[in-house]
Image (cartoon, coloured by chain):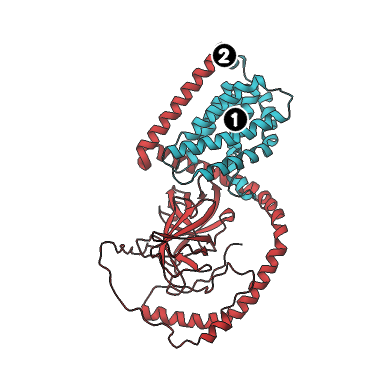
């Protein structure tokens, strides 16, 4: 159990530095993939809503702590809900499907970015308008779909190596 | 059924916690506990991001270089024409420099570029798509303080908004929260430059009838409550806006700094200049502007004023008219 927690924490840390250090170096303009979101999606598709919500909460809190202006807690809320929704949809998705995870990455990328931006705007963040919000949602959705195989498969393999204990599965 | 209900309970609990965090943060503002926690998180994660960056930066730069290869041929052609244009201007610049030195002595102004700076490396960008900030590896221990100006090789990069012992967060000049008092180097027309995120910057000109044209260079100004040292290049006017506007006239500014390629910066740590209070509430003052260059031969303009094709982004006069000295190139 501890090994699994450490492994997931390491995955979140690698995802964070990849998102904040590596992708800014690549020619992706201002819209970058949301790697932390993809990790949450991967956990949800592999293990369901319970662990996905916990990982989503941690990933969101990590994002919020490194954001300067937007209120702390927005990413926490969004990624937790994404973890729940994708985890709840898992029984309806074919485990062997290749396109389903990509579609989930595409939809969650756009929806989570739009939800984050909308909540920030509702809470008084007026740095961007509806046009930027739509562009960002579209950009993140496309990027997330493109790199989804590079994130979903390794995370799924890691979760297989560190499976949930029977006690945690009951919880 | 039982599992699903428990999942909903956990969702409700975590959602409640997130909402409480949002409420506390919104209510406490910049002085609350959560704001301090963000500073701690930045300080803790900065070494990790720095170490990771050292490992992966070569790969990122290599990947970036592959794309840039395709644009090198076109860029080479543009640079060749720029060299030709600059060669033509060389003699003019030498004369302007001499004139500039004389004017400095005459006005008893401090050397504009005599900044006391601290070099820093950009460690990471903000994780949010909607925030234009970077983390640099210089902090309080290096003499960095909040609200200090951050400059790059091409011009103003932003200002420091959060400081820890060894790192700082810099609000980039293109962030919509950023603004700076600025003026046109050619005419001295003043205004307020604002960031617009991924869109070009905007300069709100104080005078709707201001003499500002596409190609004019925009630099920071200490006038009107400006907090930045004067004369730092900001960008070049792409669209001068509608001079017939009855309200505020907005000019579109293309920043010199390529904010997607900022790797090394300088933090201006010198004593901030005295801020000149804005002239609000004071009666208008009539004065006769002095005739400058009354005996200038207009034919000189014909010899030096032509800009070759493809150099439209270059300012017509690359020297600052009243602060003088800076010669800058727009970002490609």
Rendered position, B196 above or below A8: below
Do callouts 2 and 1 point to residues on the same chain? no
* Colour red maps to chain: B
Q: Residues within 10 Å of mark 1 (few under 14, many from 20)?
A: many
The residue tagged 1 is: A40
Q: Secondary structure at mark 2?
A: helix
B281 vs B148, left or right, is left
Chain coloured cyan in this rendering? A
Image vertical order of residue A20 relative to residue B82, above or below: above
Percent across and percent down for residue B209 are 41, 67
Q: Which chain hosts label 2? A: B
Label 2: how many Cα within 10 Å (few below 14, some 14–19, many 20+): few
Q: Quadrant of residue B306?
A: bottom right
Camera-side residue of B174 and B115:
B174
Residue A55: give x, y in percent of width and height: 56, 28
Q: Nearer the viewer, residue A112 or B10?
A: A112
Q: Alpha carbon of mark 2 to alpha carbon of mark 1: how far?
A: 19 Å
Judge left or right: residue B177 versus residue A90.
left
Q: Does A1 appear above or below B52?
A: above
Q: Which residue is mark 2?
A: B3
- The chain letter under disc 1 is A
Give residue B36's quadrant in the image.
top left
On the image, the x and y values in percent for residue B110 come to: 39, 73
């Amino acid at each position: 159990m501890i090994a699994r927690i450490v492994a997931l924490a390491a995955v979140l840390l690698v995802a964070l530095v990849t998102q904040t250090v590596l992708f800014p170096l690549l020619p992706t303009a201002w819209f970058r993939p949301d790697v932390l979101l993809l990790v949450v999606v991967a956990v949800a598709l592999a293990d369901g809503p319970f662990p996905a919500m916990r990982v989503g909460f941690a990933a969101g809190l990590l994002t919020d702590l490194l954001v300067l202006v937007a209120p702390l807690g927005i990413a926490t809320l969004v990624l937790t809900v994404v973890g729940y929704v994708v985890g709840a949809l898992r029984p309806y998705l074919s485990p062997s499907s290749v396109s389903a995870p990509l579609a989930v990455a595409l939809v969650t990328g756009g929806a989570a970015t739009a939800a984050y931006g909308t909540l920030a705007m509702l809470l008084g963040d007026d740095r961007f308008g509806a046009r930027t919000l739509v562009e960002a949602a579209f950009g993140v959705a496309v990027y997330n779909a493109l790199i989804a195989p590079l994130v979903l498969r390794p995370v799924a393999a890691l979760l297989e190596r560190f499976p949930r204990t029977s006690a945690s599965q009951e919880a | 059924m039982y599992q699903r209900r428990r999942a909903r309970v956990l969702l409700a609990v975590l959602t409640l916690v997130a909402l409480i965090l949002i409420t506390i943060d919104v209510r406490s503002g910049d002085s609350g506990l959560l704001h301090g926690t963000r500073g701690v998180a930045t300080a803790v994660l900065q070494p990790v991001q720095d170490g990771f960056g050292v490992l992966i930066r070569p790969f990122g730069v290599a990947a970036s270089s592959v794309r840039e290869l395709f644009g090198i041929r076109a860029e080479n052609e543009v640079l060749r024409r720029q060299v030709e244009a600059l060669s033509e201007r060389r003699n003019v610049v030498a004369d302007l420099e001499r004139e500039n030195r004389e004017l400095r002595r005459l006005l008893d102004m401090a050397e504009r570029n005599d900044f006391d700076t601290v070099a820093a490396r950009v460690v990471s960008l903000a994780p949010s798509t909607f925030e234009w900030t970077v983390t640099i590896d210089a902090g309080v221990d290096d003499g960095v303080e909040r609200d200090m100006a951050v400059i790059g090789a091409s011009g103003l990069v932003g200002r420091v908004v959060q400081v820890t012992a060894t790192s700082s967060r810099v609000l980039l000049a293109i962030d919509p929260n950023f603004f700076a008092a600025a003026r046109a180097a050619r005419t001295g027309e003043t205004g307020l430059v604002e960031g617009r995120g991924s869109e070009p910057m905007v300069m709100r000109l104080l005078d709707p009838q201001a003499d500002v044209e596409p190609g004019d260079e925009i630099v920071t100004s200490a006038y009107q409550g400006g907090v930045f040292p004067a004369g730092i290049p900001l960008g070049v006017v792409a669209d001068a806006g509608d001079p017939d506007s009855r309200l505020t006239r907005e000019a579109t500014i293309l920043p010199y700094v390529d904010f997607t390629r900022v790797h090394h910066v300088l933090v201006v740590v010198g004593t901030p200049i005295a801020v000149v209070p804005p002239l609000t509430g004071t009666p208008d003052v009539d004065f006769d502007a002095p005739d400058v260059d009354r005996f200038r031969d207009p034919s000189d303009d014909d010899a030096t004023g032509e800009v070759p094709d493809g150099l439209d982004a270059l300012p017509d006069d690359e020297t600052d008219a009243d602060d003088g000295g800076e010669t800058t190139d727009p970002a490609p």
